[in-house]
Image (cartoon, grey):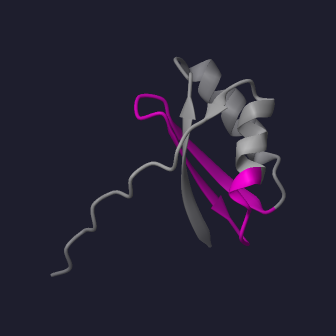
Amino acid sequence: MIETRHTVLGMVCSHCADIVGEEIGRVPGVTDVRVDIAAETVVVRADRPVPRAHIHAAVEEAGYTPGPPPPEPPATPRS
């Protein structure tokens, strides 16, 4: 499973998140989409590499603006 993070600008409510999630979910190879409205990020899981341009095109199709890649979350220390 491949997981990528993307920034989506302009989302303000759960309806926005639903629209973005549905559109990205239609991209071939995408298996799961998790939208965080407050952070303006989307985590995309796919069964194969999906070009960032395909995700950005889906975001634009939904009526929103793709942003620059979000910073990676801090690594979790291993015990």
Q: Residue furthest bottom?
A: 79
* Residue 24 appears left or right of 6: right
Q: Is residue 76 above or below residue 8?
A: below
Q: In this picture, is 47 found above or below 8?
A: below
Q: Does 41 lie within the magenta span?
A: yes
Q: Quadrant of residue 21?
A: top right
Q: Residue at x 81, y 31 (%)?
A: 61
Q: Position of residue 74 (x, y in %)?
A: 27, 61
Percent x, y of residue 46: 69, 64
Going by the picture, which residue comes out furthest to the left? 79
**Residue 63 relative to residue 34: left or right:** right
Which residue is at a point 73% across and 61% down the rendered structure image? 51
Residue at position x 56%, y 64% in the image: 3
Quadrant in which the N terminus is drawn: bottom right
Q: Is residue 5 magenta?
A: no
At 68% across and 56% down in the image, what residue appears?
Answer: 52
| Quarter residue 11 falls in | top right
Residue 73 position within the rendered picture, expressed as x and y whole percent measured from the top left? 34, 57
Which range of residues does the magenta coloring cover? 29-53
Which quadrant does the C terminus fall into? Answer: bottom left
